[in-house]
Amino acid sequence: MKKIEAIIRKSKFNEVKEALHGIEVNFFSYWDVTGVGNEKEGHVYRGVVYSTSDIQRRYLSIVVSDPFLERTVNKLLEVANTGAVGDGKIFVSTIDEAYRIRTKEKGSDTLK
């Protein structure tokens, strides 16, 4: 099993959610987060300078069985991409074990 952590633009979240459902990734958690990016200059909107060093993003935590890893990452890369600085990051790590609390099942069956 693999854990995919993705930090994406909030504006792309609904599109990403639908795309993940489309490849049968039906369960994941998400949070609104603030991060610090590489961009140091502020933006001017209607004469007011706004800091862009603190960036609002959405953090997704997705656990998938090994066969779903590549298609999930590829879908995130495809759908979350705008081609502009600040599209986000994807991190993949290994999950040693998973348990379903209700039935006490363990392993990849807990993802179904």
Image: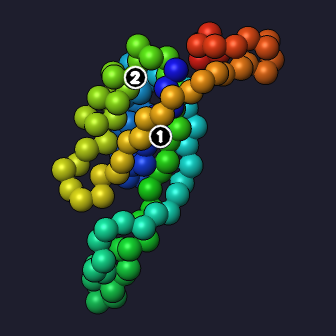
**In the rendered image, which quarter contains the C terminus?**
top right
According to the image, label 2 marks what residue?
69
Q: Secondary structure at mark 1?
A: strand
Residue type (three-letter) at the residue carrying disc 2: Leu
Question: Mark 2 packing: few (<14 Cα in 10 Å), some, or many (20+)?
Answer: some
According to the image, label 1 marks what residue?
5
Give the x, y percent position of residue 78: 25, 34
Closer to the chain start, of discs 1 and 2, is: 1
Q: Is residue 106 left or right of residue 42?
A: right
The one of 84 and 64 positioned closer to us in this rendering:
64
What residue appears at the point 19 percent right and 50 percent down from the top-left corner?
A: 83
Give the x, y percent position of residue 91: 42, 41
Q: Is 10 located above or below residue 41 in the figure? A: above
- How much space separates mark 1 and mark 2, taking CA atoms? 12 Å
Give the x, y percent position of residue 68: 41, 18
Give the x, y percent position of residue 108: 59, 13
